Structures are given as structure tokens and as C-alpha cells.
Image (cartoon, coloured by chain):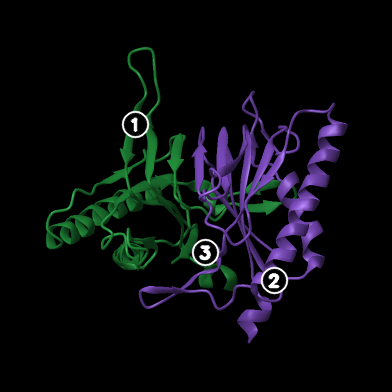
Chain colours: A purple, B green
Amino acid sequence: MTEKSCGPVARTVLQQCLQARLQVKPADEHSEAQFVQIDRGMVIYICFFKGATDDILPKMVSTLLNLRLCESGSGKVVSVTELPGSLLIVPQATLGGKPKGRAMQYHNNISKEDGLRLYSTFVSLCEKELAAAASAGGGAQVAVKHGTYGNRQVLKLDTNGPYTQLMEF
Amino acid sequence: MTEKSCGPVARTVLQQCLQARLQVKPADEHSEAQFVQIDRGMVIYICFFKGATDDILPKMVSTLLNLRLCESGSGKVVSVTELPGSLLIVPQATLGGKPKGRAMQYHNNISKEDGLRLYSTFVSLCEKELAAAASAGGGAQVAVKHGTYGNRQVLKLDTNGPYTQLMEF
């Protein structure tokens, strides 16, 4: 019980990219697969746990978008909003896995409905925060792209060093 | 003090790949950049913390290589040795970051010398374990490739879903 109430309610893994491309709709008999793509920026893999609520989202977004995690052209470490860079948000339920024997279990992951709701709000808040920063910074061409919740996240990543970070909330 | 003695001594992030390519030597005036590459398999991003010793390495390797994290051609979830798949090991000191204000700090990361030694042994143990499994499985063509400790890890990743996992030891 103690572990649950003290543990994080959201886990993110962050990677820097030069370009990242993510499938948002697989091919079917009627149409080809659809993709979204960003250039220079940050990939946010995200997973919510049981107990996560909307309350944590503003702080999460503010932290992730303002932490100095990105290397600027001059080698200075700046935030993704200062870079300015784009965001690719990838829902990643596997981040909630805990090993039991040789298998992974996901008992602590949030329900699909609640997860989708939190994920959608998280994406919206990122869009707002990045747009506000870009507008304040002179209207840089940055974008927030995101994967389809619950889908397979077919991803292609090109980096100049991913500088992988873990951030829990 | 309590936190330190209870916390993990190594953090890994795992991603599945169809292909991954990593720079192991940057270009200089005499030669072009050098890269290693794997096809189907798993990328292991790894960071050691203060207090990590050689004792933990056999268990780490055995766990990471035998956990069922990979999707086989038939859709079954199997370990990377059962797949059989290759390994790309990427030293990733950023995984030890903790935010202080807007900056990341790395006070809990192991010293460079100890980190390099543990990393080298970790790579060797992975090579042995994967070779043993491949030989038992009929000599499948799998490989262990790895980044140069302390360098920038220029990485290109192609996935059919990274299925990102966090494993701490």
C-alpha cells in the first residue's frame, strides 16, 4: 500500500531528435499508412499509472517543456521551448511494465479510458505551451505531433545523440 | 541517506528495433566517422549510479536478455535471446539526471572510471550470454554492438514499435 501511494503516477522517457517519424494510422485495404513527423526537437514517451489525475498535467507539461534538456546550435543546453524545437508525443504503455519472472506485467497502468483522457489533455497542454513560447519567441516554426493512443507506435528516429532522460511525476 | 542506500544502482531503458545504427567514432581530419549497426533486436541504454559494483552485472544481463520483451514474427512475446535478436548497448549518462530547478544534475552518477569498467564488463557478459544462446539455438546470426563510453551517441533507430521499457537494478 505504501509503495502505491508514494510511487509516481506518470512516467516519461525523453529523447532528443533531429527528425522523428511516427505512424498514426496503419495501412488498410482502403488507404496507405499515415505518419506524422517532426524535425529538430524532443520525443516524449508517456505512460500514466493508476491514481493519475488531470491535476498533475499542468506541472508535467511545464516541467518537461522548460527543463534544460536540449543542446542548442551553439552547444548551450536549453529547454525545448527555447531551442525552439518541436515535440513528438508517443503513448507508451510498456513504460509501466514490472517484471514477474520472465514476463512483464502492467497491473499499475491506468485504465484505457482514463489514460486516453489524460493523454489527450497532455497533448493539448503541450500544444498550448509550445505555441505560447513560439509566439513569444518570434513565431518559430515548431509543432506538436503525437501518436494514436492504444496503437502500435511505428517510430523512426534520427538523432545527434538521444540524451535519453527519465522523468517521473 | 536512506534514499541513497535503497535506490537503484543501475538504470536501463530498452527499445525494440528493426535496425539501429550508432556512431562509435566521430569523423576527424584523417578519417570518416565509424558506425556499428544491428538489425532486428534490442537497444539497451545504460547508466550506472554510485554504489554499483560488478556483483550486479550477471543478474542484470541475465534479466535483460531473458525477459520477454520482444515480439516474434508470429506475434508471440519472447526474450531477445529467443527471438533471436541482436543487441545494441548505448552508454547513456543522461539517464541519471535529476532536475534541480530547470537544470539537470548528475550527482548520483558513478565516476567515469568505474562506469567505464562496469560498462565494459556488462558488454562482455552480454556477448557471452547471447553467443551461448545463439549457439544453443542453432547458431543464429546475432551480434552485440555497443557505443564508445563517454562519447556522443549519434543514433539512428528504425522500429516497428519501440515498446520502451524501464528496468532498474
Label 1 is placed on what type of residue? Phe
Calculate the distance from the C-alpha at mark 1 to the C-alpha at mark 2. Answer: 43 Å
Residue B13 in view in this figure:
yes
Question: Which of labels 2 and 3 is toward the front?
Answer: 2
Q: Is residue A105 above or below residue A152?
A: below
Asked whether, in this view, residue A147 is left or right of residue B50, the answer is right
* Quarter residue A37 falls in: top right
Question: Marks 2/3: CA distance?
Answer: 17 Å
Which label number is shown at residue A113? 2
Q: Are marks 1 and 3 on the same chain?
A: no
* Amino acid type at mark 3: Thr
Q: Are marks 1 and 3 in contact (CB under 8 Å)?
A: no
Circle 1 crowding by C-alpha within 10 Å: few under 14, some 14–19, many from 20: some
Pointer 2 or 3: first along the chain: 3
Q: Which corner quadrant of the image does residue A78 belong to? A: top right
| Residue found at the far bottom of this picture | A1
Residue at 33% in and 48% down: B40
Residue A93: x and y in percent read 56, 64
Kind of residue at badge 2: Glu
Query: Would you say residue B1 is visible in this rendering?
Result: no
At 71% across and 32% down in the image, what residue appears? Answer: A83
Quadrant showing the N terminus of chain A:
bottom right
The residue carrying mark 3 is A94
Q: Are discs 1 and 2 less than 8 Å apart at CB? A: no
Q: Is residue A59 above or below residue A137?
A: below
- Residue at 58 percent across and 43 percent down: it is A34
Which residue position is annotated with label 1? B35
Total labels: the figure holds 3
